[in-house]
Amino acid sequence: MNARNRILATALAMDIDEDPAVRRRGRSVWVHDINRGRRQFGEYHRLVQELRLDDARSIYALWAEQARRQQFEEVLQKIGPTIAKMQTNYRETISPAERLCICLRYLSTGDSFRSIAFSYRVGFCTVARIVRSVCEAIWECMVSDYMPVPGAEAWRKIAGVVLLSRGESYPSWEQHLIPLV
């Protein structure tokens, strides 16, 4: 190999070494050891299941304000098939009920993803994905029931209420709130 080829090979090797995609480290573990005990020590499998079995108390989802078991089950029935994941041989999936509990815990308490991840014994990136997917599923599955698109008559009624509440009509294009120079 002549000197020119050696210089080119060295430059190419240095360029590859500086590429962040080449230097990126892979994951060292698939599921962290502390998260493997989710079924024995995780909040869903301990506390939430105890509350679920306690019929004397009407609270099923601890973090949803005044949520009753029936309401939780109703929401779960509507969005469960959407948020369910396929069971594989590699790892155990998180059940739709546990996914909904994680999302409700985040929405009702505002805890950080990390604190929820530690208490439920799942990864904090997993918590972020769960919250996003469950919120999207709630929107997709329930928006038509609870927020139907108003018809023409309903829009007229809404417009009338808005105009009456203002006491005047909307400003015309000639009127400016901020003087234009």
Image: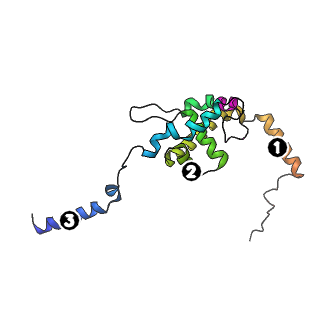
Outermost residue, left side: 1
Q: Find residue 59 and report its image quarter.
A: top right
Above or below, 166 against 64 in this view is below
- Mark 3, secondary structure of its residue: helix
Q: Which range is magenta? A: 63-75
- The answer to which of 162 and 86 lies nearer the viewer is 86
Q: Which residue is mark 3?
A: 10
Q: Residues within 10 Å of mark 2 (few under 14, many from 20)?
A: few
Q: Closer to the camera: disc 1 or disc 2? A: 2
**Dividing the picture into quarters, in which one does residue 98 lie?**
top right
* Percent of width and height locating residue 41: 52, 40
Identity, as a three-letter code, of the amino acid under mark 2: Ser
- Asked whether the viewer can see residue 143, the reply is yes
**Of the residues tagged 2 and 3, which is closer to the observer?**
2
83 left or right of 56 in image:
left
- Label 3 is placed on what type of residue? Thr
Could you classify mark 1 by the number of other residues whose Cα lies within 10 Å: few (under 14), some (14-19), or many (20 or more)? few
As measured in the structure, the alpha-carbon distance from the residue carrying label 2 to the one carrying label 3 is 47 Å
Whether residue 118 sits left or right of residue 1 in the image: it is right
Q: Is residue 114 above or below residue 90?
A: below
Q: How is the image coloured?
A: rainbow
Q: Which residue is mark 1?
A: 159
The reply to whether residue 136 is visible in this rendering is no
